Amino acid sequence: MPRITVADALALPVLRRGLPDVVAGADHLDRRVRWVHAGEVSYMASQLRGGELLLTTGMGIGRKAVDQRRFVAGLAELGLAALVIELGPTFQELPGPLVQAARQHDLVLVALTREVPFITVTEAIHTEIVNAQYALLRRGDDVQQRLTQLLLEGQGIPEVLRATAEIIGNPVFLEDGDGRLLFHAGATVEGIDALDAWKASSRPSGRAPWRAGLAEPVPLSGHGAAGRLLVLPVTGPLDEIAGVALQRAAGIVALALLRARQEEELIARERGNFLVDLAEGRTTAAHAERQAGSIGFKTSSGQLLPLAAETAAPSGGASWSLVLRDLTAELESHGLAVLAGQRERPGELLALIGLRDPAGRAGVADVAARALRTAVDRRLGAGETRVAVGDATPWRDAGPALRLAAETAASSVALPPAPWHDVRALELQRLLWHWRDDRELRAFVERRLGPVLEHDRRRKHQLLPTLEALCAGGWRKAEAARALHLNRQALYNRLARIEELLDVDLADPEQTLTLHLALRALPHVDRTDATGR
């Protein structure tokens, strides 16, 4: 990374000609040289700001040991990068007290055994410093351009933070004014999770090495207190480009927040990412429980109710995030702990709800489904909302239970509307949904139902609803007639036509079971595939 250290300076040809000898502070040659100064007065410390490489012949240091120790102590306290003394008329060799004081204060002390023009040294190092600063600015401009391009391409804050974390090589966190995590991005190294590092960094008594992070303020729309963008050295140390990249990213994030209120959307995405990782098995249950606690979700009983939902209502990211906020607020008003997030895109929800008593599962499911529909109606307008609820589960089984709830919500598009769908009752439905792209399933549906589907495509009077009503009524003709508001003879005529088209006997249990499976699979396959057109 572009920075000039004491070691870099000593390696320059102009200083190498002086045959430099490092007599103290050899372990600190990586200190940054901010500037170069030459001087010969005893009060040099008052003339400097820290970070300089000081060139001197030693005239102002003094001959007495007490003066030499005082001179070194003043420079060390100031934060001098290095003290370089040219041997000659003042000192034929460096005095013992001076060297001892430098070692005591960890000050880099260098003796030049040959004379070199200080002005030449100053010019050479200043040129390197300016070049390094220019290179750093160019890197900053490249970062700015890359992050700005993401916004121009329609990307949002999550993508900007992921790019920033990639540039810096460490995780990046966006917090609101209260220190609440809105979103984070960045890699995790083995044994250290980014959220664990963030949580540890927020503890005043913590001594984790990543507490020494970098932060930049970020104004949040509608808030008096500014949030901040934080980077922690979890996967590696932070260098100068980290500070520049974080500064540029903070400006881009602030710009994105001005375009639209995104704090709630970021929260929905952050929690959604966590829940998706849990459902997909990308995080262990024990780890997930710790992560959930770090973002404020805790349950007293350890029992969780997994819930998933999808809505057909038009939903932009900001509006859907407000739905999740309203849902969370409503459930919390009932004393329920809830962790809800956006699954993959706006309109898809995953949630874990803390259960005080597993026996109250149905009641909690009713409250959650009602609260979700109310929030959808308020924020998005009318639209079908499908809710699937799993069984009460401990943390160790939460991931698979969430995945089943998500699959049930997706597959329930083929089911009649219901306040909520019970995962336990829909094993066949999920299985057929899983096979929706299977060519054999499509061929099966075509063989069993194709002639009826082709008939209904060409004729005004439909036969498929009759077959569906008969199946729903347990293949009892009287119940099918009542459901269709038909007299018995009219129903018999339709059933005879179905038997003729499909070449089946509707009194044969084996054949009706086959038709039942085909009817259940039909909503999950493309009807153009089923009819061959």
Image (tube, rainbow, N blue to C red):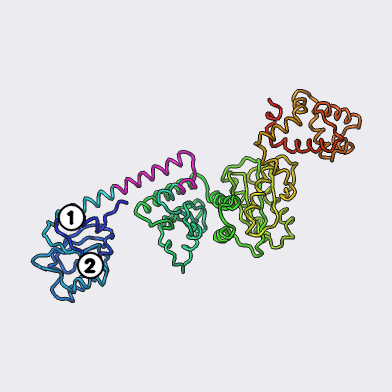
Q: How many marks?
A: 2
Q: Amino acid at mark 1?
A: Thr
Residue in view at x 71 percent, y 56 percent: 364
Q: Main secondary structure of the magenta part?
A: helix
Residue 162 is situated, as x and y percent measured from the top left of the image, at 46, 48
The magenta-colored residue range is: 135-162
Q: Earlier in the sequence, mark 1 or mark 2?
A: 2
Q: Is residue 532 above or below residue 517?
A: above
Q: Quadrant of residue 171?
A: bottom left
Closer to the camera, 134 or 330? 134
Q: Is label 1 in a helix, a strand or a loop? A: helix
In the image as oriented, which residue stretches furthest toward the top?
458
Residue 414 is situated, as x and y percent measured from the top left of the image, at 72, 39
Residue behind mark 2? 24
Q: Amino acid at mark 2?
A: Ala
Residue 294 is situated, as x and y percent measured from the top left of the image, at 54, 60
Q: Is residue 402 above or below residue 505?
A: below
Residue behind mark 1? 122
Q: Is residue 158 magenta?
A: yes
Q: Neighbour class for label 1 at 10 Å: few (<14), some, many (≥20)?
A: some
In the image, taking residue 305 as reference, residue 321 lies left or right, namely left
In the image, taking residue 456 as reference, residue 477 lies left or right, namely right
Q: Is residue 293 above or below residue 279?
A: below
In the image, taking residue 94 as reference, residue 221 lies left or right, namely right
Q: Nearer the viewer, mark 1 or mark 2?
A: 2
Residue in view at x 28 percent, y 59 percent: 30
Q: Is label 2 in a helix, a strand or a loop? A: strand
Q: Is residue 367 magenta?
A: no
Q: Neighbour class for label 2 at 10 Å: few (<14), some, many (≥20)?
A: many
Q: Is residue 26 above or below residue 386?
A: below
Residue in view at x 15 percent, y 69 percent: 94
